[in-house]
């Protein structure tokens, strides 16, 4: 790793990888996030159009960023689609494509998931946190929840602006903050006492779990979104929260 300067990551690689990158002062690019101004269609020669938008985004980033290596989590905390994407990138790019399996179990805690702050800001902080192995400093106090967001960090964060600051985060996003992406027990938890939106990216395997848990929850909305948040998706969330008596 010492010979690298800039690396990309897909998913949440093990803390050992992130800690090593931090110690060597490497620049880490989270390839799951939209980082380059390129059409998502540039991923189509490598991945089907009917595929997870997060992984299509990762391919676009990998094709256009100057990287020395890519580390991808292809273990139980990610999905087979990530493994296939890594296989394709390994044969496409002239840089090392290093597959890892994150089975970390040391819990870092989930203070942001339970804090009273704008949901977009908290999700941005959670996704940014994947690039650091440092323990959390000065965590915010928890708040009483008035709504819940269960799921993965969406590709289009604008949908998060519809939720009140007192929304608690559940699902894989909570596992992400906890730095235990393969903790399926934590991922399956939700609060049945508050109205909750169960969200997944379209064409993601987690749509099955999101829909299943939404059926178990007494007051839930299941929602999947592809690349961008449509006006229909926004209207569904707004109506659900308003009819549930949730105030902004």
Image (cartoon, rainbow, N blue to C red):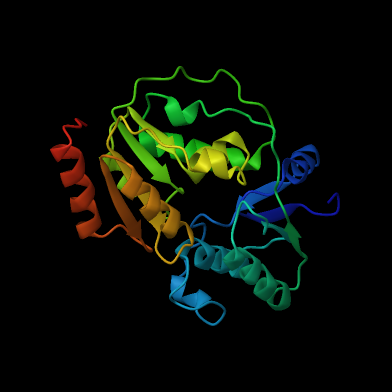
| Number of callouts | 0
- Corner quadrant of residue 202: bottom left
Q: Nearer the viewer, residue 15 or 195?
A: 195
- Image quadrant holding the C terminus, namely top left
Residue 186 in view (yes/no):
yes
Residue 68 in view (yes/no):
no
Location of residue 210 in the rendering, given as x and y in whole percent from the top left corner: 40, 52
Vertical comparison of 149 with 73: above or below: above
Location of residue 140 in the rendering, given as x and y in whole percent from the top left corner: 48, 19
Vertical comparison of 141 with 215: above or below: above
At 85% from the left and 54% from the top, the residue drawn is 3
At 48% from the left and 57% from the top, the residue drawn is 34
Vertical comparison of 136 with 12: above or below: above
The residue sitting at the bottom extreme is 45
Would you say 38 lies left or right of 81 here? left
At 19% from the left and 44% from the top, the residue drawn is 240
């Amino acid at each position: 790793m010492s010979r690298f300067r800039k690396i990309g990551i897909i998913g949440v690689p093990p803390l050992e990888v992130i800690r090593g990158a931090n110690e060597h002062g490497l620049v880490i690019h989270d390839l799951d996030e939209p980082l380059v101004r390129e059409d998502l269609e540039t991923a189509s020669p490598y991945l089907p159009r009917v595929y997870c938008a997060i992984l299509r985004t990762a391919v676009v980033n990998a094709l256009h960023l100057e990287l020395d290596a890519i580390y991808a989590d292809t273990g139980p905390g990610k999905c087979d689609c990530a493994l296939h994407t890594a296989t394709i990138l390994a044969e496409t790019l002239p840089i090392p494509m290093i597959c890892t399996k994150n089975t970390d179990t040391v819990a870092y805690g989930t203070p942001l998931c339970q804090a009273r702050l704008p949901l977009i800001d908290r999700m941005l902080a959670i996704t940014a946190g994947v690039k650091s192995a440092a323990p959390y400093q000065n965590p915010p106090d928890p708040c009483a929840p008035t709504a819940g967001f269960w799921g993965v960090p969406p590709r289009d964060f604008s949908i998060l602006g519809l939720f009140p600051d007192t929304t608690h985060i559940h699902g894989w996003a909570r596992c992400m903050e906890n730095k235990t992406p393969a903790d399926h027990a934590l991922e399956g938890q939700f609060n049945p006492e508050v109205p909750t939106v169960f969200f997944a990216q379209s064409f993601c395997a987690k749509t099955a779990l999101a829909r299943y848990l939404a059926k178990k929850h007494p007051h839930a909305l299941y929602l999947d979104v592809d690349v961008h948040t449509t006006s229909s998706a926004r209207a569904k969330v707004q109506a659900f929260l308003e009819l549930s008596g949730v105030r902004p």
